[in-house]
């Protein structure tokens, strides 16, 4: 099975995306799922989008470059976290 | 590094009487700058970033903002804290058009992300804990807030 690539982005590419990327890594490990994670700024997504299967952000995403995208702010607030994490994992399992 | 190592009582202001988010940015930046944590460029960079990518978080009971900016403006990592007398308006990270009335601000000075993964994870755990936020908001002194954070049971396992 080919590895899926997920872009994890936030405003600066170092704060909330770090936390979200760790949570996705952990969830994928539990599912024995191998994925590539690219962490970047929202403004840098364009450069990586072509090879990505999924875009996950903590901010509003104005352009998803024709890719599936999921807002993961609930992984920061904790409100509805499980559901969103499950949605991300299911998308990466496809 | 554990999150408590990023706090310093010189970087905490309690019961701050702010009218706008700029008041909070100014006072916390002053503390970070005077104590050698950030460069002079940090303040404008934080304000600019906040406009484009706001950091207000709508939580269960108390709302929090986590302003921060690019590592190039940071000298050494730290978290500055302000608890407010009255909440001020931030914009929601989820939607820049939506207001969030924020009670407590954690201004983060981050230099490189990977060494600070643990700190960021613990900060997120902390803001998700209503009772912990309530304790922090109820304190008058920086020392007491640092004690609360030191003594709380945040999961410090690295993943």
Image (cartoon, rainbow, N blue to C red):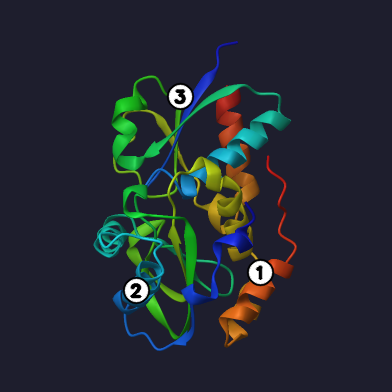
Camera-side mark, 1 or 2? 2
Q: Which mark is residue B149?
A: 1
Horizontal side of residue B89 vs B14, given as left or right: left
Quote the CA–CA distance across marks 1 and 3: 39 Å
Quote the CA–CA distance across marks 2 and 3: 43 Å
Horizontal side of residue B16 vs B133, given as left or right: left
Chain containing mark 2:
B
Q: Which residue is mark 3?
A: A53
Q: Secondary structure at mark 3?
A: loop
- Horizontal and vertical percent for residue A37? 50, 29
Chain containing mark 3:
A
- Horizontal and vertical percent for residue B77? 47, 56
Work out whether residue A53 or residue B140 is closer to the camera in this orientation and state it.
B140
Q: Residue at horizontal 37%, vertical 54%?
A: B74
Q: Secondary structure at mark 2?
A: helix
Disc 3 crowd rating (10 Å Cα; few below 14, some 14-19, many 20+) is some
Quote the CA–CA distance across marks 1 and 2: 23 Å
- Mark 1 on the same chain as mark 3: no
Q: Which residue is mark 2?
A: B30
Q: Earlier in the sequence, mark 1 or mark 2?
A: 2
Dot 1 and dot 3 residues touching (CB under 8 Å) = no
Horizontal side of residue B12 vs A60, given as left or right: right
User: How many numbered tags mark residues here?
Assistant: 3
């Amino acid at each position: 099975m080919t590895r899926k690539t997920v872009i994890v982005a936030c405003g600066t590419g170092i704060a909330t995306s770090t936390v979200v990327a760790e949570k996705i890594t952990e969830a994928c490990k539990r599912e024995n799922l191998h994925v590539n994670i690219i962490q970047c700024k929202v403004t840098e997504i364009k450069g990586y989008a072509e090879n990505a299967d999924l875009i996950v952000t903590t901010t509003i995403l104005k352009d998803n470059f024709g890719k599936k995208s999921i807002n993961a702010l609930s992984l920061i607030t904790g409100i509805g976290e499980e559901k969103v994490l499950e949605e991300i994992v299911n998308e990466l399992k496809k | 590094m554990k999150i408590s190592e990023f706090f310093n009582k010189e970087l905490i202001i309690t019961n701050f009487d702010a009218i706008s988010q700029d008041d909070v940015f100014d006072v916390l930046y002053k503390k970070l700058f005077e104590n050698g944590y950030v460069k002079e460029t940090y303040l404008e960079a934080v304000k600019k970033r906040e406009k484009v990518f706001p950091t207000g978080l709508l939580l269960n009971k108390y709302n929090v903002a986590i302003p921060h900016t690019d590592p190039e403006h940071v000298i050494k990592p730290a978290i500055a804290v302000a608890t407010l007398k009255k909440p001020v308006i931030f914009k929601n990270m989820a939607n820049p058009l939506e207001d969030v009335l924020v009670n407590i601000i954690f201004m983060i000075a981050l230099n490189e992300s990977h060494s600070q993964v643990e700190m960021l994870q613990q900060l997120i755990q902390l803001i998700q804990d209503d009772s912990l936020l309530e304790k922090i908001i109820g304190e008058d002194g920086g020392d007491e807030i640092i004690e609360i954070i030191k003594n709380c049971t945040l999961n410090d396992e690295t993943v």
